Amino acid sequence: MKQQGDIWLLHGELTVRSLGAALPRLLALKGADIVLDLSNMQRFDTAGAWALLQLRGQQQNTGQTLSLQGQTGEHTALIDRVEQAIPTAPQDQKKRFGIHDLLAGVGKVVVGVGRFLAEILAMLGVFLARLLYLARHPSQFRMTALVYHADQVGWRAVPIVSLMAFLIGVVLAFQGAVQLRQFGAEIFVVDLIAISILRELGILLTAIIVAGRTASSFTAAIGSMKMREEIDAMNTLAIDPATVLFVPRILALLITLPILGMIANVMGLFGGALMSWIELGISPAMFMTRLIEDTSMDHVIVGFVKAPVFALIIGIVGCHAGMQVGGNAESLGKQTSSAVVRAIFAVIVADALFSVFFAMMGI
């Protein structure tokens, strides 16, 4: 590197091999505007371009300039590419938060919820349309798939549902006994157990457990098929994915969830009766007599009316989430966890709406 007047002449090569010696000499050129002549450069690579950019940054920090002359088009293009590739530190911006940001956030949430509900209703419409089609063309119905999914979502869920309901009955009886003993009303623990389990907790907790098991499995199965482009292959082969994938799964839930709810009711009453016998001395015969005489069938009907609705919610949410899976495993995991949360939340909201409705109807 030689100086000729106000211009510094670069000659030889400015590459990664010579960078260790050339960079300190370049950065030593400071204190005034610099003009570099690259016309005599024999070799020039990305390391040399990076060195010139470092010198330019140093000059800009001191309020000086760096001018290049004699460079070829290749030199200019290389410097531009290196400059674009250098990462820039993110600028710290103070995040403002005001009424406009609050309204914007609320608006985004409302729009997102509205879009999700519209997609869920569309999925429900697709399921009902395919179900009516299969009712008119029963030969196309896949009974093997229905039996398989009924086994997966129904029979295999019996142990955990039974254990959960039994323990809930035990807890209700024990807590009720502790509170009602203070007023000498221990016998009313039978009414507490019967109404709580038959009307609310039996089917609600069953639906929550099934939502955790089934919504996630539906999403994982359909999402994996979507990742592997099996659903695209079905469309190519003129096989309707809704008929093959959605209808057997949701229909299996519609059939098995009421049965699981009945099992949960029986096991919950059994657990409550056992704890009442141990804690309060209420014999099984007395418990059964009190249960039959003082428990209205309205409570049983209210519980079973909810089961098909909960089954539809869980099945549709799980299948919808599976169809939203992208082409990577991260999307599959996100949609699987999201399906469980949405299904459980929707089941609880539906149960609350049922409670308000039956209260207004006087049932």
Image (tube, grey):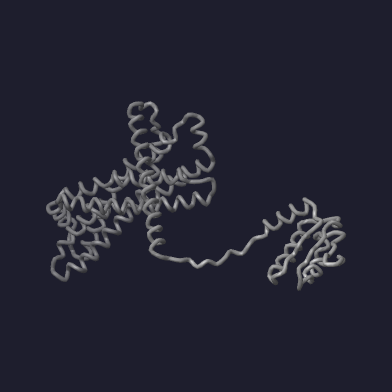
Measured as percent of width and height from the top left, residue 28 is found at 79, 71
Is 134 drawn above or below residue 111 in the view shown? above
Closer-to-camera residue (195/140)? 140
Query: Residue 291 lies in what quarter of the image?
Result: bottom left
Closer-to-camera residue (270/245)? 245
Closer-to-camera residue (114/340)? 114
Kindly identify the residue that appears in the image at 16 percent across and 55 percent down: 285
Kindly identify the residue that appears in the image at 37 percent across and 57 percent down: 106
Measured as percent of width and height from the top left, residue 117 is found at 36, 47
Measured as percent of width and height from the top left, residue 349 is found at 30, 53
The N terminus sits in image quarter: bottom right
User: Would you say 335 lies left or right of 208 here?
Assistant: right
User: Would you say 298 lies left or right of 327 here?
Assistant: left
Query: Residue 268 lies in what quarter of the image?
Result: bottom left
Numbered disc total: 0
* Residue lying furthest bottom: 31
Is 128 drawn above or below residue 185 in the view shown? above
User: Would you say 53 lies left or right of 233 here?
Assistant: right
Kindly identify the residue that appears in the image at 21 percent across and 53 percent down: 356
User: Would you say 318 lies left or right of 66 here?
Assistant: left
Is 265 drawn above or below residue 231 in the view shown? below
